[in-house]
Amino acid sequence: MKTGFYNISVLYGASPRGTFKSGSAMMQLDVLENAYLIVVDGTIVELGTLDSEGLKSYTVSQSGEGSFKQSQFPSPESTINKSEADLKKDVEIFQSIEKTSSEKTPLKAEAGEMESKNLELSEIHWIDLQGAEIMPGLVDSHTHIVFAAPRHEEFALRIQGATYEEIAAAGGGILNSAKKLRIALEDQLFEDASARVKLMMQWGTTTLEIKSGYGLSVDSELKMLRVIKRLKSNFPIHIKATFLGAHAFPMEFKERREDYIDLILRDMLPQVVAEELADHIDVFCDEGFFTPEQTERILIKAEQYGLPAKIHGNELGLTGGVQVGVKHGAWSVDHLEHCSELEMELFKQTNGATIPVALPGTSYFLGIPFAPTRKMIDFGLPVALATDFNPGSSPVASLQTVCALACTQMKMMPQEAFHAVTCNAARALRMENEVGSLAVGMSADFLVMRSTDSVKTIPYYLGQNQVLHTYCKGRRVASSALNS
């Protein structure tokens, strides 16, 4: 199916395929004004601008060089200043003219092949976006959305002064979630997680990483990963699975930690790989959890199976998570509430091979320091942001809320936060050639925004959903319908 979207007042994220941004480049927005884009089989094949003479297409090659071509098409009248009535009308128009589908369509070709196509305008089903702004779908590279129950009781304990470490030492925290998950039915876990995915889609998430780590036994870890596999099959967005058996030491192994690592390496990891249940492996390398030496032992084994690493590191102190992550080529090290210039220099030496991922929802909810992302960006690093959506330390589903926290608490500029939840977050999943920007050859994942100057309004309107419609692979997969 060939679908064209036109009358786009501003198209954000018009970066070359494979883009991620470091340091001062995170302030530079790549935009097209009065834009359109054309989608074939879920992939962007053309995008460009409309002027008084018609369509002027702009295609970006992998080298970053752009080229224009001209076609005749009526230049629509912009309606960028929308009233509430106009937005309600938009909802009705979208619902009446679109055909929704949950079919998954993989990318068909590379950018260079796409540029050679000569599409006839009459063959395209055109959708008028009526002067709305669009931006790439948001990429959440760190979540724990498969869980059995919330942890309200711990929330109350923290209000009364208990720390995260104290709660964990008393059998709460991750171990509390593990206890509940072990007795939960797989179907119920799937239904509960499905509701969370739907909510995240309404708030603009089109690419989602989900971790295991609340099972902490062979059967329960596999149960979690099978739920994630079902989510992959049942939702139209991009979902990646991460095996996090090394999230904590279960109570039965409290005094036998090396035995639990043996269990991960001998029993869990081979089954995870045999059933193709994970795209990555993760280890919680931090004070009171897994040491750098224990983490390295797990990563070496994972490398033998071809599983790339993503590390929980430096949430509770300068505990070596960055060092072991960089040493073993981890795609990202996440948390980083404690990060000195030594760690920043290690990140910088990787030239973007290991991405620093900050989780401001966790810092806000636990009342712990925020990752020093202002210093990281000034140091020249490609910072990413994620929700860390989980039942205990960050029950935050919205990357829009994460952007607001990053701006107000971590002094990131809105443009920097935008890139941190799009192209840089895609890089943390090694998906920057597929998602995170709007370019020829990439998945047609984009958000139709309800406001103007939307890169700035996302962090400004805290708690107010700025996404009107969420598209993935060129199809509308969610709408906030003015009630979020």
Image (tube, grey):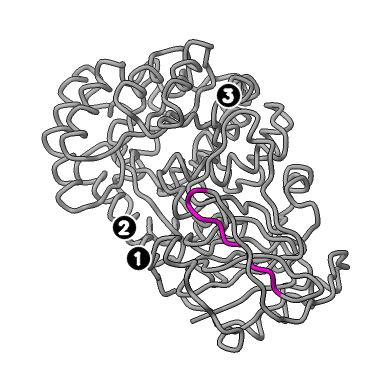
Say which residue label 2 marks. Answer: 229
Q: Is residue 14 above or below residue 21?
A: below
Q: Camera-side residue: 173 or 345?
A: 345
Residue drawn at point x = 22 percent, y = 38 percent? 217
Q: Is residue 61 magenta?
A: yes
Residue drawn at point x = 43 percent, y = 20 percent? 349
Taking the view exactly as shown, the residue that stands out farthest to the left is: 266
Q: Quadrant of the C terminus?
A: bottom right
Say which residue label 3 marks. Answer: 380
Residue stretch rendered in magenta on the structure = 55-63
Q: Residue 326 appears in which quarter of the rendering? A: top left
Task: Report whether 65 appears left or right of 274.
Answer: right
**What main secondary structure does the magenta stretch of the protein show?**
strand
Q: Is residue 304 above or below residue 293?
A: below
Three-letter amino acid code at the position of disc 1: Ser
Q: Earlier in the sequence, mark 3 or mark 1?
A: 1
Q: Earlier in the sequence, mark 3 or mark 2?
A: 2
Three-letter amino acid code at the position of disc 3: Gly
How far from the left and from the top, in percent, is residue 453?
Answer: 79, 52
Q: Camera-side residue: 79 or 459?
A: 79
